[in-house]
Image (tube, rainbow, N blue to C red):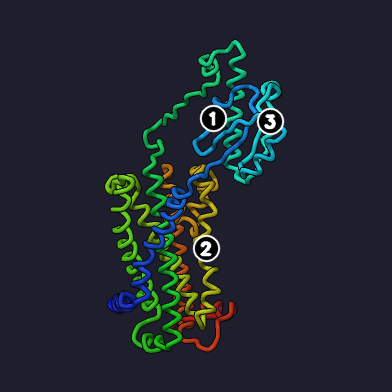
Amino acid sequence: MKGLWKIANWEITRNLTNKQFIIGLLLTPVLMGLFAGVPILLDRLNQPSLSTYYVVDHLGELASLQALLPENIALKEHQDSGSIADVVRDTNSSGYFTLDQSFITTGQIDVVYNDRSMETLSTVKGSLTALLQQIRLAHSDISLEQLAFVNAPAQVREVALDEELEPQTMHMIVAMVFTVLVFFLILTSGTMLMQSALQEKRDRMAEVVLSSVRSVQLMQGKILGHFLLGLMQLIFWIAIGLPIARYFWDFSIMEALAAVDVPVILFFGLGGYLLYSALFVGLGATMEDLQSASNSQSLVIMLPALSFLFLGPVISNPDGTIAVFASIFPFTSPAIMMLRSGLTVVPLWQTLGSAALLLLTAWVIILLASKIFRIGMLMYGKNASFKEVVKWIHYKES
């Protein structure tokens, strides 16, 4: 145990003094903020330009139609329908159309456009529909109050039989945030683990280290060290993100923690990390160089990414068959079980069964990875083949 903590401390110290780690620690929240904030900023800056349509108005409804349109769409009346196309071209306007009695009778109208703004054209079409309904209503015996009464939608209130069944927005938001954070922890820490094993193997440091500690201790120490590093990253990013969330969205920290099942999130988050970190460190021990590791890394990354395939069915039906399967299957249960805990009341047998299966799978993976790690760290000159990896699993450590 003492050797395990020494290795973990060495991994933490080595990375905390690494410039790349510090830069990534500081740069990641900036990049995440840019990805989240830039689309919002661009949407605000992307103000619609002024569009002008010329109208031949035989109905005298131009003012009524203009009232139905937003400020960025202007209508100009034109008397001569024969020259209206030339006017639109000369003024580079958006298009033209004619309001006449056939529009009231048939409901059909040709809007000739001169630009490719489908959003503006869709707005014009919607306003023409509203105008047609108003005119037809005015010529009928139905009052506006009667029409509103007939077309009024049903006011359906969703009332949960038990209070615990009522969906809570805070539950869902916090569960989704924790799911993303744990996935990011697995991804970043797993990648660092694989690169650390690869570097020690390449620099032949493993020979010296393995002469004083057992291979299982070395692997466990590396996993523990990088797990603590990942927690430091998450705590640092959360410490930055929570004040921002509280400022912009009035986010209550205590309410958020009370809204989720913290023990379930911690257990499945830790279990998922142990499972995937063993896969990453075992993979790093079988590779000879960084390029080979990068090519094989995507295979391991695809396993935790499997959870995202089930997000749609789980969110739409958290108690369905697919959601239950994904929350029990050990390679997707860490993320899906955390997500389901915020969407519904998960039966106790599903939680316990999923937890037991995850622990069993993680234990088996760690045992296999330790055998692969023990021999792979001492093999140089080539990447291990699948047959060689199978042989390493059957070797017994003296």
Label 1 crowd (10 A; few <14 / some 14-19 / many >=20): some
**Tag 3–tag 2 contact (CB < 8 Å):** no
- Residue 395 place in picture, x, y as percent: 50, 81
Residue of label 2:
303
Residue of label 1:
66
- Residue 340 place in picture, x, y as percent: 44, 47
Q: How far apart are labels 1 and 2 at the CA level?
A: 56 Å
Q: Residue at x 52, y 71 (%)?
A: 297
Identify whether 332 is placed above or below 137: below
Q: How far apart are labels 1 and 3 at the CA level?
A: 20 Å
Amino acid type of the residue tagged 2 in the rendering: Leu
Residue of label 3:
80
Secondary structure of residue under mark 2:
helix
Q: How far apart are labels 3 and 2 at the CA level?
A: 67 Å
Q: Is residue 363 visible?
A: no
Residue 346 left/right relative to 385:
left
Amino acid type of the residue tagged 1 in the rendering: Gln
Q: Is residue 224 visible?
A: yes
